[in-house]
């Protein structure tokens, strides 16, 4: 079983930055993709960014050029550097890991609030 613990959320002003972290523990079978999703009340959870074991990345159009996803395989941690934050980035951010065999694990979420 995989446990994911997110941290780094909080309140920031428009134009500010935050860095989210998600540390994985337990049994994860490589290769595994790590990603960040976000969700606002009444909306579906949406992909923000993903990074594969080899380092290839993809981003939602709304965050390209502002957010950067990275990972530390040794520490089994994924990061999301968020710059130039906008009020529309306000959401609960979730970490997701998909391991070999398509085993999916989610974190508990961390709130990001961007004030205007």
Image (cartoon, rainbow, N blue to C red):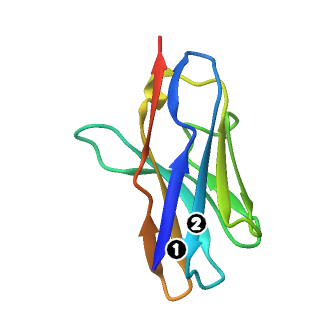
Disc 2 to disc 1: CB gap under 8 Å: no
* Element on which disc 1 rests: strand
Residue at the (65%, 83%) spot, across then down? 30
* Residue 81 versus residue 116 in the image, above or below: below
* Residue 26 versus residue 12 in the image, above or below: below
Front residue of 88/20: it is 20
Looking at the image, is mark 2 or mark 1 nearer the viewer?
Answer: 2
What numbered label is drawn on residue 98?
A: 1
Q: Which quarter of the rendered picture does the N terminus lie within?
A: bottom left
In the displayed structure, does residue 108 sit left or right of residue 30? left
Front residue of 59/35: it is 35
Indicate the position of residue 98 as horizontal and vertical percent values.
52, 74
Reading the image, the residue beneath label 2 is 24
* Residue 112 versus residue 57 in the image, above or below: above
* Residue found farthest to the left: 42
In the displayed structure, does residue 3 sit left or right of residue 74? left
Residue at the (47%, 10%) spot, across then down? 116
Residue at the (55%, 82%) spot, across then down? 27
Indicate the position of residue 25 as horizontal and vertical percent values.
57, 70
Residue 41 appears in which quarter of the rendering? Answer: top left
* Residue found farthest to the top: 116
In the displayed structure, does residue 74 sit left or right of residue 95? right
What's the distance in space between the residues labelled 2 and 1, CA to CA? 11 Å
Q: Earlier in the sequence, mark 2 or mark 1?
A: 2
């Amino acid at each position: 079983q995989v446990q994911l613990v997110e941290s780094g959320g909080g309140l920031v002003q428009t134009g500010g930055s935050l860095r989210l972290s998600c540390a994985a523990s337990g049994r994860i079978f490589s290769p595994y993709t790590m990603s960040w999703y976000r969700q606002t009340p009444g909306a579906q959870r949406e992909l923000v960014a993903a990074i594969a074991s080899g380092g290839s990345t993809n981003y939602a159009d709304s965050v390209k050029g502002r957010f950067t996803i990275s990972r530390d395989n040794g520490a089994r941690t994924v990061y999301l550097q968020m710059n130039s934050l906008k009020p529309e980035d306000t959401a609960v951010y979730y970490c997701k890991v998909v391991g070999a065999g398509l085993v999916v694990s989610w974190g508990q979420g961390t709130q990001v609030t961007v004030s205007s």
